[in-house]
Amino acid sequence: MDERSQTASRDPRRVGVGFAEALLAVLAVSWWVGGHWGVDPAVRALLWLGLVGVSAWVALRWMRRGLRRLLWRLRNRLIIAYLLIAVVPVGLIMLLAALAGWVLLGQIAIYLVQLRLEERASLLQRGAQALLEAGPEERHKAWLRLRPILEDSLPGVEAIVMEGTRVGWSSEPELEPPPAGWGATRGLVRREGATWLWGRAVQSDRSATLVVRLSSQLWDAVAHGLGPISLMEFSETTKADMPAASFGPKTLMRTPPAHSRFDWEFSWAMPTSVARWETPGKFDSPLLTVHTRISAVLAALFRQRAEGYLVLRLLYIVAAAFLGVEIIALVVGVSLSRTITRAAHAIYEATQRVRGGDLSYRIEVRGYDQLAEIARSFNHMTEPLARLLAVAQEKQRMQADLEIASEVQQRLYPRNLPHLPSLELHALCQPARVVSGDYYDFQLLGSDRLLVVVGDVVGKGISAALLMATLQAALRARLGTLEQWSQVSPERLVSELNEQLHRDTAAEKYATVFLAVYDDASGELTYTQMRAIRHLCWCARGRLNA
């Protein structure tokens, strides 16, 4: 597999079907066939479990492949990084601010409703205290003075004073006294299936109680300016089928009108305490709910509607400013990421073109930043690549020529070594480079004489190999001119070779040669050793011991 194939196999955009997909297909077919052929339910259940597990495995693999494929491009990586670094935190902060604002406004709305109920209940308790402080003869007159004051905000208020366990005075003859056991208290109370507001004062064994039923008009007065309010109870009977049972008056108020398209409605609820009239000391905790608008809460909070609208507008202006800054940051971030991805894609495209052999391709440079400088550096780098490629091709051609020369030189050496009864020959040549000037040769002179030549040409490489070939050709040519092998004299032969090479080669070229003639019959070795052809030769004669 070449480099291009390996790169293609690592490309995450290439999606193939593997073992997991094949196993999923087999399990799906087996499970479907088992359902139609009546396979044992236990086996089919195992097939189903395997199918679910392999499906999850395949889904996870494909999700990873899709994510890797998505993140392969630098542009997608930068976009996702920008979203995670900038957009997601800002979005979470905005969501947190919206939730915090929703909770805060809801709490303020509920607090305002509870504060208004508390003010009215406190007014009832103070009225009960005033009745207790009046003497028995003055209670009716005191009530006549109190009632107009109470009726302004609590229409239909009723009062009863208890002396021990008997009724000392009552504004209505049929008014039922509260059960014994209640002390001084105020707030909401559940009585006769309706919701009332009461206030009690206790002094020694006497007590005074003022109650007023929460009518729709009183309920709307409490919710004035905010919107519809209600009490929702989750009793034991309603928990089974879960709709909340509403107890309390039905409000007639509508949600205040919106002052802008961003003046949204919202609801909020909080538990509140409601006493049980028949059971002293026992309380229920229904939900006090309110449905209102942002501007209504702000207007009630600042007590003047104009101030609430102004605060709301200021909040929207700040939010719009933040949104504008975020949009500008998004545009700038996308623009910067596009410059980065464009430069990266241009460099990637250039590398692919150069890899394909198009060394004339140049990147179009834009701007004067570091990315543009990288593109310019790439263009400057590709300019000498053509020359380097030419040099590499020339070197490759020379290497091929050297390999051919080495093969030719190996053929110049004797392939088959001569055989003599009294002499065993072995030869080995290991050049330092592909070709060299090392030389050896064996030539039979008749049936019982052997010519041995060992030489070394100065230098290495092609020049030495050529001189070595010339030396071999001159030697063999000289041997071919001899009519009798007995005429072969090492001294004379080397001298003639010396003269010929001296004429035909440069002054700095020379060779060291050892030339010998071995006589198998007599065992004599006559040799000539030349330290350099261009020098005088000397000859020696001796016997080679067997």
Image (tube, rainbow, N blue to C red):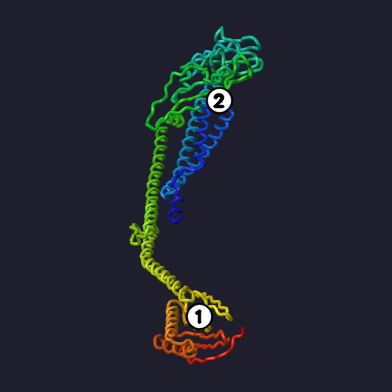
Q: Which one is nearer the viewer's eye here, 238 or 261?
A: 238
Q: Which one is nearer the viewer's eye here, 508 or 14?
A: 508
Residue in the image at 51% along x and 85% along y: 515
Question: Is residue 76 depicted above or below 537 in this figure?
Answer: above
Q: Is residue 145 visible?
A: no
- Looking at numbered disc 2 in the image, what kind of residue is underneath it? Pro
- Looking at numbered disc 1 in the image, what kind of residue is underneath it? Phe
Residue 308, picture quadrant = top left
**For the residue carrying disc 1, how many other residues have a C-alpha within 10 Å: few (<14), some (14-19), or many (20+)?**
many
Residue 90: give x, y in percent of width and height: 45, 42
Mark number, residue 271? 2
Question: Is residue 516 depicted above or below 414 in this figure?
Answer: below
Q: Is residue 280 visible?
A: yes
Cα–Cα span, label 2 and label 1: 119 Å
Residue in the image at 50% along x and 80% along y: 442
Left or right for 526, reference 370: right
Q: Secondary structure at mark 1?
A: strand
Left or right for 514, reference 339: right
Residue 118: give x, y in percent of width and height: 54, 24
Q: Secondary structure at mark 2?
A: strand
Q: Which residue is mark 1?
A: 442
Q: Which one is nearer the viewer's eye here, 112 or 172?
A: 112
Left or right for 339, reference 526: left
Residue 444: give x, y in percent of width and height: 50, 81
- Mark 2 or mark 1: name the one nearer the start of the chain: 2
Residue 36: give x, y in percent of width and height: 51, 26
Image quadrant in which the C terminus is located = bottom right
Q: Which of label 2 and label 1 is nearer to you?
A: 1
